[in-house]
Amino acid sequence: MATTPSSFKIFTNRLFGSFKDTEVVESSQKALEAEYEELINYAQSEEWLRYLELKSWADSKEYVKVKQEVEAVSFKNSPEYIAEQELKKLLKDSAFKNYLKYANTEIPNFFNKIKQSGLAEEFTELKSFVSSPDYKKDRNTHKKENSPEYQKEIRFHELSSNNDLKKYFKLQNDKSLKDYFNIEGSQTLTKYSELKAKVESAEFAERKKYLLSKNKFEQTDAYKKLHEFKTLEGSTKIKWYSKTKDSNKFDALK
């Protein structure tokens, strides 16, 4: 014969069962209220406001314009490329090569020193004198008397053996040295100095590296902002808030 539950047992089961149901309801209610409070607070959070700012910017497609602009730039259509090519062209010029040949030597200073000393002019005058028909005609007399005219001949022979003068007269016909003096102090040299300083600068090297790079957009602030936006957009918190804020989940609490 089946045992029938006593009235007391039925009563206690119902009593404690209702208590458990109440606890579940209260717990769910508290969780809902906590989530709702979190929703309200998050609406004013720095993260959400930053997301909205970035979303507005991303929706404007400004980054697309930036990407197109930076990708359209190349080294070959830049002022840097033009400057580099001008410098290369100048360095290939034969006259300028001759200038550089003597630029860091003492030869130009030596040449100017002898020129300014007057020795070359003196030698030329003496040579002309001792070679003249009049002097040759009376040379023996001048020599015998050791005249001032003969002293000029002695001085001429002295200068003839002067190594500095020999070197000077040889340099007079040196095309490289002529090119040096033509370029020294000229606009060409000024231009060279400007180009050299520019092309060899750290700023130029950095700019050239950027212009030759294949990831120009990734180096822009626009890319950084877009990356930040996508990171926030994919975050669990943003997804939760975006999905929950317009739902009817909290209607009972409003």
Image: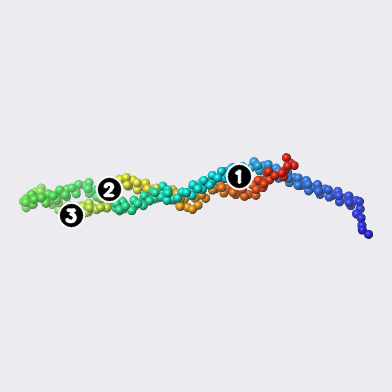
Residue at image coords 62%, 50%: 234
Distance between mark 1 and mark 2 Cα atoms: 66 Å
Disc 1 marks a residue whose amino acid type is Tyr
**Helix, strand or loop for disc 2:** helix
Q: Nearer the viewer, residue 140 or 205?
A: 205
Q: Residues within 10 Å of mark 3 (few under 14, many from 20)?
A: few
Earlier residue among tags 1 and 2: 1
Disc 2 marks a residue whose amino acid type is Asn
Say if residue 144 shows up in the picture. Answer: no
Image x and y of residue 97, in percent = 31, 53
Say if residue 49 shows up in the picture. Answer: yes
Left or right: 135, with 237 as reference point: left
Q: Report the mark closest to the observer, 1 or 2.
A: 1
**Helix, strand or loop for disc 1:** helix
Residue topped by disc 2? 182
Residue topped by disc 1? 51
